[in-house]
Amino acid sequence: MEPKEILKSLNEDLKKAVEHTLREFSSLHTGKATPAMLDGVKVHAYGSTVSMKEVAAVTTPDARTIMVQPWDKSVIQDIEKAIQEANLGLNPVVDGAILRVPVPELTGERRQELAKTAGSMAEEGRVRVRQGRRDALDLLKSAKNDGLPEDDFKRAEKDVQKAHDDAIAEINEHLSSKEEELKKV
């Protein structure tokens, strides 16, 4: 494999790792309601497990409430149960054909817990980035053994390390802003 191909593949992997970490961060609620808070909730309906988006429209009419409107009213109890079992600290209230999910005010203890969770999510992202770097370096070493010149190998190795450092810095930057967001609210 050519160094350019290896770097292109690495950059795609690192981008995916950072995006995954950001999606994980969006699931942490900071006291402000967002539809993304329910993205990870799986509903047992119609004899299988489906995502929330497949069975309902999720909106936020205000900063403290998430509104879930099922496509089919017969699954409203299943959605309510799924939200309760997701351990998000949310208690949905059935209001006719919709579910209202009030987002509680964050306590200091809950903020610290969420900050720890954000830290572990960031660490998972950093591990993925390091794995990408390791895989890219292995491919470069293999290319070197197949005749890649030493100068090209060293240059590509520096490029891999720079891409790794940039991805780690981006994750750390987002972690810092998420922690600040958790402190403010």
Image (spheres, rainbow, N blue to C red):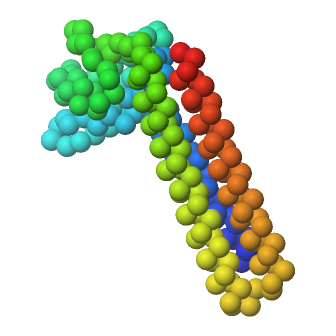
What is the count of numbered marks? 0
Residue drawn at point x = 51 percent, y = 40 percent = 119
Relative to 47, is 160 on the left or the right?
right
Q: Return the x and y of residue 20 as percentages of the image width and height.
A: 51, 46
**Above/below status of 40 relative to 102:** below
**Residue extending furthest toward the right:** 151
Residue drawn at point x = 66 percent, y = 81 percent = 141
Q: Nearer the viewer, residue 9 or 145?
A: 145
Q: Return the x and y of residue 106 as percentages of the image width and height.
A: 43, 16
Residue drawn at point x = 34 percent, y = 27 percent = 88
Residue drawn at point x = 48 percent, y = 11 percent = 63
Q: Is residue 66 visible?
A: yes
**Above/below status of 143 relative to 100:** below
Relative to 91, is 5 on the left or the right?
right
Picture quadrant where residue 109 is located: top left
Q: Return the x and y of residue 12 as percentages of the image width and height.
A: 62, 58
**Above/below status of 14 relative to 1:** above
Picture quadrant where residue 102 is located: top left
Q: Is residue 55 visible?
A: no
Specify the quadrant that holds the N terminus: bottom right
Q: Return the x and y of residue 85 as percentages of the image width and height.
A: 23, 31
Relative to 46, is 113 on the left or the right?
right
